[in-house]
Amino acid sequence: MRNPTVAAILGLMTLPLVASQCEEDLPQPVITVAAFTQAGTWYLSEYKTAGQITRADSIKDRFALRFAPDSSYRRILLSNSSETAGTWKLTGSHNRRLHLTDPTGDQQDFYVEAINAESLFLYRDRGGPAGSFMFKTVR
């Protein structure tokens, strides 16, 4: 004779197992050069380091970035509109590593957390103080 209560309990016990199998991580999309270049100018809007968030005009030496399809970029210091040029490239798994080289040869690497038509999220964990950077297409 079957016991409906036992069957119901066994059924409920298997739900977390089934649900966890459905929640596997989806593959991250590949970051493209076009995602960086189509936006025009990326303005640093937020910087977070050591648990402290600094936003917009409160950011010391706030800057903007312009990426070109020819692997060049410009960094514009917003306080005086001075520009420096350098090179950039996407590397790593799914092009998630942004590598910048400035005119003096200094190099910086950032992890690209996300990018869309309006926002760019970068994270740096080496080659300088760890921190996250949020850029927007509007100042």
Image (cartoon, rainbow, N blue to C red):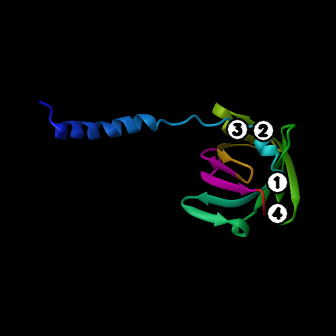
Residue 132 painted magenta:
yes
Image quadrant for the C terminus?
A: bottom right
Q: Give the CA distance from mark 4 to mark 3.
A: 27 Å
Count neighbours of disc 2 (C-alpha within 10 A) and say few if under 14, some if 14 to 19, many if 20 or more. Answer: some
Question: Relative to residue 115, is residue 11 drawn left or right?
Answer: left
Q: Which amino acid does label 4 sit on?
A: Leu
Foreground mark, 4 or 2, reads: 2
Which segment is the magenta one? 120-136
Q: Give the CA distance from mark 1 to mark 4.
A: 12 Å
Q: Which mark is residue 41?
A: 1
Q: Quadrant of residue 47?
A: bottom right
* Residue, disc 2: 33
Q: Give the CA distance from mark 3 to mark 1.
A: 17 Å
Q: Give the CA distance from mark 4 to mark 2.
A: 24 Å
Give the answer, above or below, for where 51 lies relative to 31.
below
* Residue, disc 3: 31
Q: Say whether disc 3 or disc 1 marks the residue closer to the N-terminus.
A: 3
Q: Which amino acid does label 3 sit on?
A: Ile
Residue at horizontal 80 percent and vertical 52 percent from the top: 65
Quick one: 107 or 30, which is closer to the camera? 30
Q: Say whether disc 1 or disc 4 marks the residue closer to the N-terminus.
A: 1
User: Which residue is farthest front?
Assistant: 1
Instruction: Classify mark 1: helix, strand or loop.
Output: loop
Count neighbours of disc 3 (C-alpha within 10 A) and say few if under 14, some if 14 to 19, many if 20 or more. Answer: many
Question: Relative to residue 56, is residue 132 drawn left or right?
Answer: left
Q: Say whether disc 4 or disc 2 marks the residue closer to the N-terminus.
A: 2
